[in-house]
Image: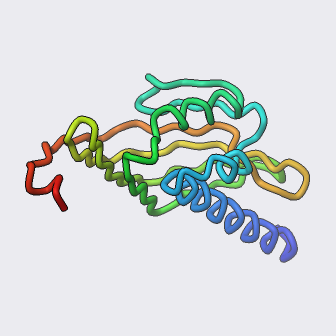
Amino acid sequence: MTLEQRIQRLEDIEAIRYLQAKYQRCLDNRDFDGIRECFADDVVSSYGNGEMAYVGAENVIAFLKGVMSIDMPSAHMIHGGEIDILSTTTATAKWYLQDFLINKAHSVNIHGAAIYENTYEKIGDAWKIKTIGYKRMYEYYDMISQTQQAT
């Protein structure tokens, strides 16, 4: 591998790391236009062990808008990032996810951990998420007390 190829590989890895971080930030800020920028037009999702699968950016965004309402604060934190560049235009990555959600409507806190297994495609000069999904390792529900709801 030439020095130029090695540098390009590192630049691609950093671009994918940035892209995934942007997706997570936009998700928690309910910035659906920002999320759309992260997706390939024909993105395929497989959230929650494949139970929530959608094809096409607009369908995935519609799903996210339906479940990620502004009155349900969340924090989706990714760690690691085992990024493999497969070619000049394709890559895969595994990310460790820890998520925390407050579902005020049902008075419950949700804590979980999962592994994202995503694929990426370089379209023009920009990397995009081609497939996105996670498999849960655990999900924990904690009822919110009346005292917690008041704060």
Q: Is residue 80 above or below residue 94?
A: below
Q: Nearer the viewer, residue 115 or 32?
A: 32
Figure check: 130 above or below 126:
above
Residue 110 lies left or right of residue 36; in this view the side is: left
Q: Position of residue 142 (x, y in %)?
A: 15, 45
Closest to the observer, 84 or 113: 113
Which corner quadrant holds the C terminus?
Answer: bottom left
Q: Residue at x 32, y 52 (%)?
A: 100
Q: Quadrant of the N terminus?
A: bottom right
Rendered image coloring scheme = rainbow
18 and 105: which is toward the camera:
105
Name the residue at 69% across, 49% down: 33
Q: How many marks?
A: 0
The quadrant in which residue 13 appears is bottom right
Percent coordinates x, y for residue 7 in the rendering: 79, 74
Tell me where residue 119 appears, x and y as whole percent. 65, 43
Is residue 127 left or right of 70 when viewed as pictured?
A: right
Residue at screen point 78% across, 71% down: 6
Q: Residue at x 58, y 39 (%)?
A: 132
Give the x, y percent position of residue 111: 26, 48
> For the view shown, which residue lies furthest in the right direction?
124
Q: Is residue 94 above or below residue 77?
A: above
Q: Looking at the rendering, which quadrant does residue 44 occupy?
A: top right
Q: Is residue 18 left or right of residue 139?
A: right
